[in-house]
Amino acid sequence: MTKLIIDAGTSWSKILEISCKADFKSIILSVNKDFQQYQIQESKFFYDKDNKKFFGNLFLIPSTLAATLPVEFDNATGHMVKKRIKSGGYYENEVISLAYGAKKLVKNLKDATIVDIGSRDLKWVQFIDGKYKDLDWNSSCGSVTGATVDMLCKFYNVDPNKISIQTEKIPLVCGVFAMEKIMDDISKNTPADIAIAKYLHGIAYNTWKFAKKPQKMYLSGGFCSNNCFTETLKLYCDVVPLGRYVLLKGLF
Amino acid sequence: MSKNKLIGMWGFPDPEILNQIKLKYPGFEIIDLDQNLNHPNTELLPDNSCKIIKNIVDNAVYLKNNLELIIASVGEEKCDAGRFAARILTELGFNIIETKYNKTCTKKIKIPVSTSDLPLKQKVLTIMDNIIVPVKKEFRIKKADYGFWGVPPNDISILDLFPDNTHVYGWTRCVEAGAPADLDLEMFVDENIPTVFYAQTFCAKMQLGKHLARKYNGLYLDVDDVASNSVKAKIEAFIRLG
C-alpha cells in the first residue's frame, strides 16, 4: 500500500512516496499538468530507522501545489500540513524531525551542529558524543531568508548559481529589513547579483552566529545547493551540506 | 464585566496586610491582576513592556468600577515595573495599597506543590491561588525528570507541554516557600535535571534565566504575549531529545 511522507515547508514541499509505482505523480498531474516541470527527484531504495529497506520516489513541489492535492499523509512535518494527516498517522515538529534526520545522515555525532535554513526560519540542533546537547529555532528575527533570496533573484533576473562571494555583508538576517538595504544598494548602482551576494553573506554570518559559532556546520535546506552561500559560510566554519531532505528523512 | 465587588492584587503582597484586607472586606472577591484576562489593551504602557505588567494595568482599567482597592507588590518580591505601575494607577485615581515583602527563606522550606505529581500547569496555578486562599491539601511527591524555572507565563498553555514529573523552580517556587524575594532560592535548580528557564520578554528575570540556562545547560526561553509554534516546538524537542 502506498504511504506518503511529507516535509511541507513554507515554499517547497518534500514528499516521499513509499511505493514501487509512481501513483503520486499521476495525482499531481490530475491537479496540475504543469507538474511535468517538477520531475521525481530520485527513485531508489531508502532505509528506515530499523534499517529496513524500501523503495520510494522523492518529489519536490511548491507547497502551494501540495496544498491543492486530494491526499492525506501518513507522516508529516512542516508548517503547512498539520490538518492533512491520515487517522493513525503522526505529525512531528520540525526541530525533532531535523534531529532524527541528522542522526540518520551524520555518521559522527561526536560534536555536530546541524542547521536547517528554511524559507522563513532557521533552526539548529547540536549533538555531543552522540547525544542531544542544545537547540534553537528562530522564526521571527530569522524570518523570510530563503524566500527573500528566491524573490530577489526572480525580480532582478539573477541566476543564483552565478553569484560570486562578497566579503562585504548586509548585516541583517531578517528578509523584510534586508530588502530595503538591498534595493538601496542597487539604487546606488551596485549590480543586483553583488547586492544579493552581500545579503547572502549576512545570512551566512548570522546563521553561524545564531548556531553559537560552531567550527563545523552540517547544513540542511535549499541553501545547500546555493554555491555562493555555502562558500561564504566557509569563511566562518567547515560546511557539510546534507541536502534539503534531512527533515523528511527524520520521519521514517 | 463582572458586577462583583473586587479587591485587586498583584505579585506577592505581605500576607499580614492581605489578611487584614480580607477581614475588612468580607464578601469581596480577590482577583490576581497579573493574569491575562483578555481585557482590552489600554496602550498606557510602551509596547516593549513586560506583558504581565501590561495585564495589571489593562485589567485594572477595565475593572475600575468594580475595584474597591488594589494591593500592589512593589518590593524586591516583584519588580521596578510593578512599583511604577502602582504609581501610574494611583495617578489614574485607583486606591492603591503598596506592600513590600522582602522575606527570605528559613533553612527548611516547604514546597509540596512544586515537587508534587500534579500536572505542571496545575502546580503553578495552585501555588498562585495559594497566595489568596491557602490550600490545605496533601500532595504526593513525584521524582523530577524535568524542571520548569520561572514565573507563571502569560501564555499559561505552554505548561501543558511538560510531563507531570516536572518540578517547579525559580520565582514560582519562592512563592510557594513564602519567600518571593529570596534570590538564592530563586537561582536554585537541581543541576542534573533538564530544565527550561522561562522569563517574560522585557522582564529583568531574562538575565537570570539566560545565565542559569547557560550554567546548567538548560533551554532558555522568553516569550512576550502568546507562545509561537517555534517556542512550543523547542520545548517539545528539549523534552523529547533531552
Image: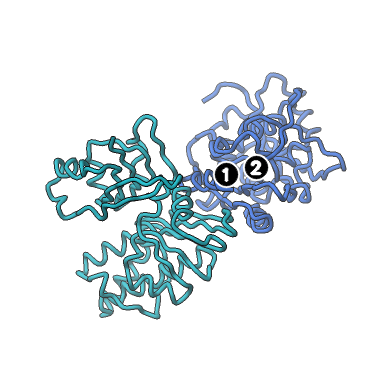
Chain colours: A cyan, B blue
Q: Which amino acid, by three-letter code, is at mark 2?
A: Tyr
Q: Is residue A168 above or below residue B224?
A: below
Specify the subunit that label 1 lies on. B
Q: Locate residue A175: give its quadrant.
A: bottom left
Q: Which amino acid, by three-letter code, is at mark 1?
A: Ile
Specify the subunit that label 2 lies on. B
Q: Is residue A238 above or below residue B121?
A: below
* Residue B239 badge: 1
Q: Could you tell me if the residues under marks 1 and 2 are in contact, i.e. CB atoms within 8 Å? A: yes
Q: Around disc 2, counting alpha carbons within 10 Å, would you say few (fewer than 14), some (14 to 19), or many (20 or more)?
A: many
Q: In the image, A218: left or right of B222? A: left
The residue wearing badge 2 is: B146
* Residue A78 badge: none
Look at 25% across and 67% down and name the residue there. Answer: A153
Q: Position of residue B195 (x, y in %)?
A: 64, 47
Q: Position of residue B159 (x, y in %)?
A: 58, 37
The answer to which of B111 and A67 lies nearer the viewer is A67
Q: In the image, B45: left or right of A146? A: right
Mark sitting earlier along the chain (1/2): 2
Q: Is residue B168 above or below residue B116?
A: below
Q: Position of residue A96 (x, y in %)?
A: 48, 48
- Secondary structure under the numbered disc 1 in the rendered image: helix
Look at 39% across and 73% down and name the residue there. Answer: A201
- Secondary structure under the numbered disc 2 in the rendered image: strand
- Residue extending farthest top: B27
Cα distance between the residues tagged 1 and 2: 8 Å
